Image (spheres, rainbow, N blue to C red):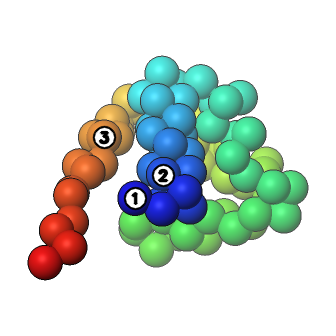
């Protein structure tokens, strides 16, 4: 597995853990000040304040729990 792939899998795992702990400070550490989040319902949230507000709404309602992505091994055949 490449170093880049391992890095991205670890990053994804850390984000998932922070989100599932509902620790918004840790979640927001993944976003830059001018980040844009496009959510699954077509919403667009621009900037950290808007992104945080969208996550706060999810956390308040306890709507989502992110499952750990499955890791697939690839054969070199």
Identify the residue at image location x=21%, y=66%.
74
> Split into 4 quadrants, where in the image is the N terminus?
bottom left
Q: Quick one: SS at disc 1?
A: loop
Query: Gap in Å between the C-alphas at discs 1 and 2?
Result: 7 Å
Query: Gap in Å between the C-alphas at discs 3 and 2?
Result: 15 Å
Q: Quadrant of residue 45?
A: bottom right
Residue at the spot of label 2:
6
Q: Nearer the viewer, mark 3 or mark 2?
A: 2
Identify the residue at image location x=67%, y=52%.
51
In-front residue for pair 29/43:
29
Circle 1/circle 2 CB separation < 8 Å: yes
Identify the residue at image location x=55%, y=69%.
38
Circle 1/circle 3 CB separation < 8 Å: no
Identify the residue at image location x=48%, y=51%.
6
Question: Which x, y percent locates residue 36?
Answer: 69, 67
**Residue at the far front in the pictured view:** 77
Seen in the picture, residue 3 relative to 14 is either above or below; the reply is: below
Q: Quadrant of residue 16?
A: top left
**1 or 3: tag closer to the N-terminus:** 1
Q: Quick one: SS at disc 2?
A: helix
Can the viewer see residue 39? Answer: yes
Circle 1 residues within 10 Å: few <14, some 14–19, many ≥20: few
Circle 2 residues within 10 Å: few <14, some 14–19, many ≥20: few
Residue at the spot of label 1:
1
Residue at the spot of label 3:
68
Q: Nearer the viewer, mark 1 or mark 2?
A: 1
**Residue at the far right in the pictured view:** 33
**1 or 2: tag closer to the N-terminus:** 1
Can the viewer see residue 8? Answer: no
**3 or 2: tag closer to the N-terminus:** 2
Question: Which x, y percent locates residue 26?
Answer: 67, 30
Q: Nearer the viewer, mark 1 or mark 3?
A: 1
């Amino acid at each position: 597995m490449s170093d880049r792939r391992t890095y991205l899998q670890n990053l994804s795992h850390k984000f998932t853990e922070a989100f599932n702990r509902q620790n918004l400070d840790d979640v927001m550490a993944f976003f830059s000040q001018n980040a844009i989040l496009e959510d699954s319902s077509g919403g667009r949230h621009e900037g950290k304040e808007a992104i945080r507000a969208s996550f706060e709404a999810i956390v308040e309602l306890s709507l989502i729990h992110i499952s750990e992505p499955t890791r697939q091994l690839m054969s070199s055949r």
